[in-house]
Amino acid sequence: MTSICGKNCCNQCSHKESCGGCVKTKGHPFGGQCVAANWVQQFGKEGLEERKQKLIKEINALKIPDLQIADLNLLNGFYVNLEYPLRNGKTAKFLCDENVYWGNQVERPNSERCYGLVADDHFLLVCEYGCNGAEPEIILYQKR
């Protein structure tokens, strides 16, 4: 087994050689934190699934139009850490490239834009963006 949580994400990751894998790094791939490994280490595999289902319910309860999910995936921070425009004309990233988060992408009906969501123990971020993450907008950022 190469992952602590058993999700098989390490076997599917094209960056495994550079991070070393979940078990080898004790849940700190890329030098950061993996939300799933943390949950298994704290709450066991059953606790991971319970917390994941609770997070899915939390997301679906937001009542954001067209945003309903059935599952969450483990996503590397460097893939989902978009630069968001700020009111002062600058841009900012809100995630850690080295962390692994829960997330998903939901295509918006009749639109070329998608919702993206990313979460861990500390926050939930919902954004909307175009093709390849173009023109991202924060819909919701809340501490958990």
Image (cartoon, rainbow, N blue to C red):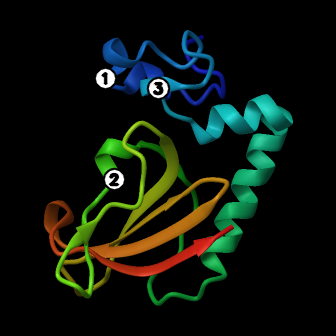
Answer with mark 3 or mark 1, whichever residue precedes in sequence.
1
Whether residues under marks 1 and 2 lie with C-beta atoms below 8 angstroms apart, the answer is: no
Check the picture and name the quadrant holding the N terminus. Answer: top right
Hey, which quadrant is residue 94 in on the image? Answer: bottom left
Q: Is residue 84 above or below residue 64?
A: above
**Residue 56: numbered disc:** none
For this view, does 91 lie left or right of residue 15? left
Hey, which quadrant is residue 91 in on the image? Answer: bottom left
Answer with mark 2 or mark 3, whichever residue precedes in sequence.
3
Q: Position of residue 43 (x, y in %)?
A: 84, 37
For this view, does 23 lie left or right of residue 92? right
The amino acid marked with disc number 2 is: Val
Between 111 and 26, the one nearer to me in the picture:
26
The amino acid marked with disc number 1 is: His
Check the picture and name the quadrant holding the C terminus. Answer: bottom right
Q: Check disc 3: other Cα within 10 Å, few if <14, some if 14-19, many if 20+.
A: few
Disc 2 designates what residue? 80
Q: Position of residue 57 (x, y in %)?
A: 70, 70
Disc 3 designates what residue? 31
**Residue 15: numbered disc:** 1
Element on which disc 1 rests: loop
The amino acid marked with disc number 3 is: Gly
Q: Is residue 115 above or below residue 18?
A: below
Element on which disc 2 rests: helix
Q: Check disc 2: other Cα within 10 Å, few if <14, some if 14-19, many if 20+.
A: many
Q: Determine the residue positioned at 56% across, 35% down.
A: 33
Whether residues under marks 3 and 1 lie with C-beta atoms below 8 angstroms apart, the answer is: no
